[in-house]
Amino acid sequence: GLISPDSRWHCDELPDYSYDPGRAQEKLKELGYTLEDGTVRDQHGEVLSLEVLVRADYAREGEIVGEQLQQLGLEVNVRSAESSVVDQRVREWDFDLVVSGHGGVGGDPDGTRRFMTGEASPHNNARLDHQELREEFTRQTRALDQEEREEAVCRIQRIHAEELPAYPLHHPTWYYGHDGEVDWFFTRDGLGSGIPMPLNYLAFIE
C-alpha cells in the first residue's frame, strides 16, 4: 500500500505479503522455473540470476534482501552505489531490483499521487502507469466528502499492493527528546511534503 501504517490514510484491507519462502518458490514454479539441488533455473537450465542495486545508505537492507533471495536458490549480485547512480538507473528502468528509500508519503494522499506517478520524482521506483489508478487519483483529488476521499485512497493502496511496483521494507521510527519547556506536537499529515516531525513554529505561539 506504500503509505505508512501510522498514517490516518493507511488502508487495512490489503493483501498479505508475510515472509513465506515456500510460497515464493511455488510462485517461481508457476512462472516456469525449476528448483534443482536448491538452485532456481529457467527453461534452458540456466541459473536465475538477479542484480540487487542498493543505494549506499541502505546497504544493510540490501544485504538482507540479497541473503533471503539466495536462500530461495537465486544467484544474487548485491551492488551498492551512490544515490545519483541508483536514481539514474531507476529513471532509465535499468535494474532488476532496487533497494532505496524516500519520504513524502506520510502526508496528504496527493503527495503519494505525485510520487507514484513520477510527477514529484521521476527516479522513484514506486511509479506505476495504471488506468484505474489514475482514475482513483483524480477522484481523491476532487472529492469534497472526507469518507469518499478515504475510500478512493484505500482503493489506490489496494491497486498498488496488487500490482506491487515497489514493496515497503520498513517505515523508520523517529524519537525526539526535549525538556518540556515547549509543548511540542505532531502536525496532522506532517510538514512540508508530509514529513512526520514536531518542529512546528506554532508550538511557540500561545
Image (cartoon, rainbow, N blue to C red):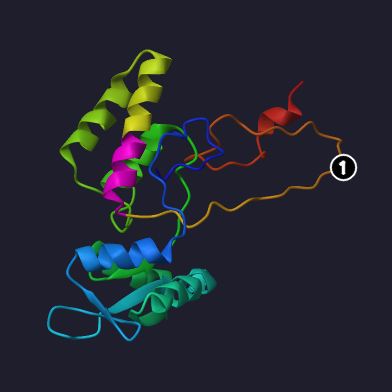
In this picture, is 147 found above or below 58?
A: above
Q: Is-magenta flag for residue 199?
A: no
Residue 94 lies in what quarter of the image?
bottom left
User: Residue at position x 26%, y 67% from top?
Assistant: 28
Coordinates of residue 195 in the picture (x, y in percent): 54, 43
In this picture, is 185 found above or below 178?
A: above
Give the labeled residue for mark 1: 179
- Left or right of 176 on screen, residue 122: left
In this picture, is 63 found above or below 122?
A: below
User: Residue at position x 31%, y 51% from top?
Assistant: 164
Foreground of the two, 48 or 90: 48
Give the tally of numbered discs. Answer: 1
Q: Main secondary structure of the magenta part?
A: helix
Foreground of the two, 86 or 78: 78
Q: Is-magenta flag for residue 157?
A: yes
Q: Residues within 10 Å of mark 1 (few under 14, many from 20)?
A: few
Regarding mark 1 in the picture, which secondary structure is present there?
loop
- Extreme residue in the left direction: 44
In this picture, is 164 found above or below 131?
A: below
Coordinates of residue 33 in the picture (x, y in percent): 21, 73
Residue 111 lies in what quarter of the image?
top left
Coordinates of residue 35 in the picture (x, y in percent): 28, 78
Residue range in magenta is 156-165
Foreground of the two, 165 or 37: 37
